[in-house]
Amino acid sequence: MSQGKLIIISSPSGGGKDAVINALLKIFPNSARLVTTTSRPPRPGNKEGVDYFFISKNEFEEKIKRGAFVEHNIYSENYYGIEKSRLAESLERNEIVFTQIEVNGKHNLDKNKIKHLSIYLLPESLNVLRARIERRGGLDDTQIAERLSIAKKEMSESIDYDYRVVNVQGKLEETVSKIADTIKQELAIDKKP
């Protein structure tokens, strides 16, 4: 059985990663979302093993010591990472494996020579991004300002992604269609002898 293709979808906080991945999962039949691990507490509506694997900071640090992660980072004082065993299992079972990681995670995959296709979702402006973050709720003004500061930095560091796509507010279907076409082209290239 051939190895699946790992596709990274990144964006700033509030940039639409989840919505895009959910739509792509419906378009590509033999695809799955790689569930990553985090030390952050679940948000309302989050499901264990669906949104993330939620573990304590201590458990996460133990797994780091054991070398259980392909890559991991700290974002907003919480750990996030891809566990080696979960990635291998998912790539074995699926033609396409989607994951949402941030820029440092992508760069860690590059350093570890893990093949992937990387797509960065850009907001049309920081004001639109701020409004998206505020609409999601659960963050105070300081946290929103921190997310926007991180977003500016990440956007400038995302220039080495394979593709960068502007996710225009209210035009999710267009964004998904562009990305789906790109993935189909990449898969066709992979299948050429």
Image (spheres, rainbow, N blue to C red):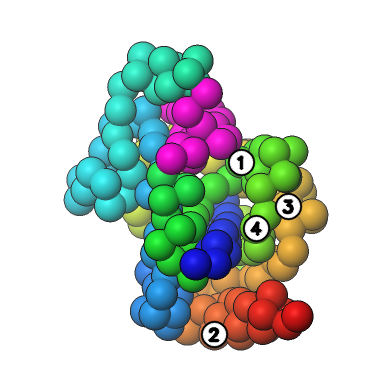
- Position of residue 187 relative to residue 39, above or below, is below
State the residue position of label 1: 105
Horizontal side of residue 40 vs 14, given as left or right: left
Q: Position of residue 35 (x, y in %)?
A: 38, 49
- 3D distance between C-alphas at marks 1 and 4: 12 Å
Start-end of magenta stretch: 67-85
**Residue pointed to by mark 4:** 116
Residue 117 in view of the camera: yes
Q: Are marks 3 and 4 in contact (CB under 8 Å)?
A: no
Closest to the observer, 109 or 142: 109
Kind of element beneath mark 3: helix
The disc, 3 or 4, on the residue closer to the chain's N-terminal end is 4
Q: Which mark is residue 158?
A: 3
Which residue is at the far front?
1
Mark 1 or 4: in front is 4
Residue at image location 42% in from the left, 70% down from the top: 31
How far, Cα to Cα, is label 2 from label 3? Answer: 21 Å
Lower position in the chain sequence, tag 1 or tag 4:
1
Task: Decide if residue 15 is on the left or right side of residue 187.
Answer: left
- The residue under the point 43% across, 66% down is 94
Question: Who's the residue at 54% across and 48% down the image?
Answer: 101
Q: What amino acid type should be assigned to the residue bearing mark 2?
A: Ser
Query: Which amino acid type is shown beneath numbered disc 3?
Result: Ser
Q: Which x, y percent locates residue 170?
A: 47, 78
Q: What type is the residue that disc 4 sits on?
A: His
